[in-house]
Amino acid sequence: MPTPVPPDVELVVVDYLRRPASALVALVDDRVYTVVPRDAVFPLLRVVRYSGGPVRSAPLHLLSIGLQLDAFGGSKADARRLLDAARLELASIELATHTGAVVTGAQFGEVRYLPDSDYNPPKPRYASDVSILAHP
């Protein structure tokens, strides 16, 4: 039997946060990305995969994927509000099928304030890790 193609969990999360029923729509419209666009409009949310793979050696299709959520705001308060809303949305992603994946869990890490010095002045940014458990 062929091994199922693993889902792109980064895109699963982006699609989930962009859906019309998401509370993020009121805060950022559809500005949830994996890369900040060159002509970015703020506030926005970036979702970046930094680690992950199979949970155990068998079956290989059960995944634990580490993502970082970066909430960029027009202000520090906007950035925090956006990160809190994204975490709240992802708390309800479990046990549903999204873009070719079944998400079975979301575990959150700490919240960090990390102003982005790529901008002058530094852009307000809050970040948090989330581990997504999923399979095809």
Image: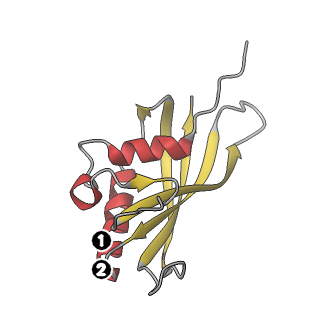
Where 93 sits versus 119, above or below? above
Location of the N terminus by quadrant is top right
Q: Position of residue 7 (x, y in %)?
A: 58, 34
Location of the C terminus by quadrant is top right
Residue name at image x 63 percent, y 32 percent: 6
Please give left or right for residue 49 compared with residue 54 in the image: left
Q: Position of residue 101 (x, y in %)?
A: 51, 32
Q: Is label 2 in a helix, a strand or a loop?
A: helix
Residue name at image x 43 percent, y 79 percent: 123
Residue 12 or residue 30, whichever sits in front:
30
Report, in whole angstroms, how far the alpha carbon at label 1 lies from the one at label 2. Answer: 6 Å
Q: Mark 2 — residue?
A: 77
Residue furthest out toward the top: 1
Q: Mark 1 — residue?
A: 81
Which picture quadrant has residue 40? bottom left
The three-letter code of the residue at mark 2 reads Ala
Where 96 sits versus 37, above or below? above
Where 81 sits versus 98, above or below? below
Where 67 sits versus 75, above or below? above
The three-letter code of the residue at mark 1 reads Arg
Q: Which mark is residue 108?
A: none
Q: How is the image coloured?
A: secondary structure
Which picture quadrant has residue 86? bottom left
Query: Crowding at label 1, few (<14), some or many (≥20) Cα neighbours within 10 Å?
Result: some
Q: Do the CB atoms of the residues marked 1 and 2 lie less than 8 Å apart? A: yes
Residue 29 or residue 52, whichever sits in front:
29
Residue 88 or residue 73, whichever sits in front:
73
Residue furthest out toward the right: 57
